[in-house]
Image (cartoon, rainbow, N blue to C red):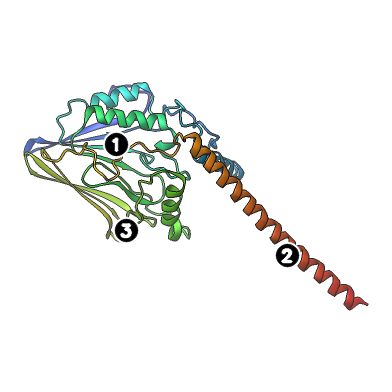
Amino acid sequence: MSDIKRNGAYISKLYIDPDNEKNQVKIIMLDTRYNKDPYPFYAPDSYRDLFVHMFISFLSRFHSSIFGLCCNSKNDILGNEQWKWLERELTNSNARAHIIISSTQIFSNHIINENWGLMPYSLRRLRELIKKTKPKGLLFLSGDVHFGSIIGKEESVIEVTSSSVNQENIFSYINKYVIFFLTNILSKVSPFELNKIYSFNNFGSVNITYVNDNEIKIKTSVNDSDGVEILVANQVFNNKNNIYTKTKDLHIILDEFATLECKSKTKVVMHTIVYILFLLWFLQIIYIFLKVIGSLFRRKKIDTKTKDE
């Protein structure tokens, strides 16, 4: 048992190949609960809260997203002590691969689920720390959301989410489409690709191959209940491949995007106009619906009166 006392359950483990001590993998597990500040918008305190509380929370984060609210919030996820520890773990590390694990998704911008993008200060700080330390062979793993996904490009840095092993339901058939379209509609950029989301029961696996002293390969997959690989990412890390170089493709570290993003005044005005038009259209649909129901009710009442006469 460790004598180290920490404010949280974060921990790191260094795995060394017994046949070659240069082959090291560092696994870093973050604690995203113990030191976490409250969300900058209304959120239920527990799953015991009523549905109406969860619905209000959804409306709160939805409006924060489309109008750019709470984007400058300083609310944090890890706490200063854990941030300092994480920087020490990544600075001048000799490991050839670094696997950072978060209970919640980090680079998702899906408003329905918990993710680091709802706490944009923490997400920005994490990106800055990664750019500063540049750990080799970086891979992010996460869960919690009841779907599997791969975010990012194999040539750079990716986040692989595996969740969950036994919670699929009727919504699993449409979940991937909801995720894809919502993130594309509400944000300037979506990290999700439709063919890299899997909404049914799944589990993840990571396989690391040491090719030689200068190259390693990491294969990460999301597998269905029968063990069939559904989503697969094959990454190659070597001295020639700089994963922190910006390309035309989305880079989850170098590109700035989050669930709660600051919006320009022009964009806020545009969103407000679209929002008002949508509300008017929705109210018109309700009015027509109630009018049809009322007409049918009156007709039934007249028919009943005619029969009585």
- Residue 291 screen position, x and y as percent: 74, 61
- Residue 105 screen position, x and y as percent: 37, 41
Foreground of the two, 149 or 177: 177
Q: At 21% from the left edge and 31% from the top edge, which residue is drawn?
A: 134
Q: Do the residues labelled 2 and 3 touch (CB within 8 Å)?
A: no
Q: Are marks 1 and 3 in contact (CB under 8 Å)?
A: no
Q: How far apart are marks 1 and 3 (CA)?
A: 29 Å
Front position among marks 2 and 3:
2
Kindly indicate the quadrant of the structure image that contains residue 226.
Answer: bottom left
- Residue 122 screen position, x and y as percent: 38, 30
Residue type at numbered disc 3: Asp
For label 1, the crowd category at 10 Å Cα-Cα, with few meaning under 14, some 14 to 19 and many 20 or more, is: many
Q: In which quarter of the image is the C terminus?
A: bottom right
**Lower position in the chain sequence, tag 2 or tag 3:** 3
| Residue named by callout 2 | 292
Kindly indicate the quadrant of the structure image that contains residue 78.
Answer: top left
**Lower position in the chain sequence, tag 2 or tag 1:** 1
Residue type at numbered disc 2: Val
| Residue named by callout 1 | 253
Q: How far apart are marks 2 and 1 (CA)?
A: 53 Å
Residue type at numbered disc 1: Ile
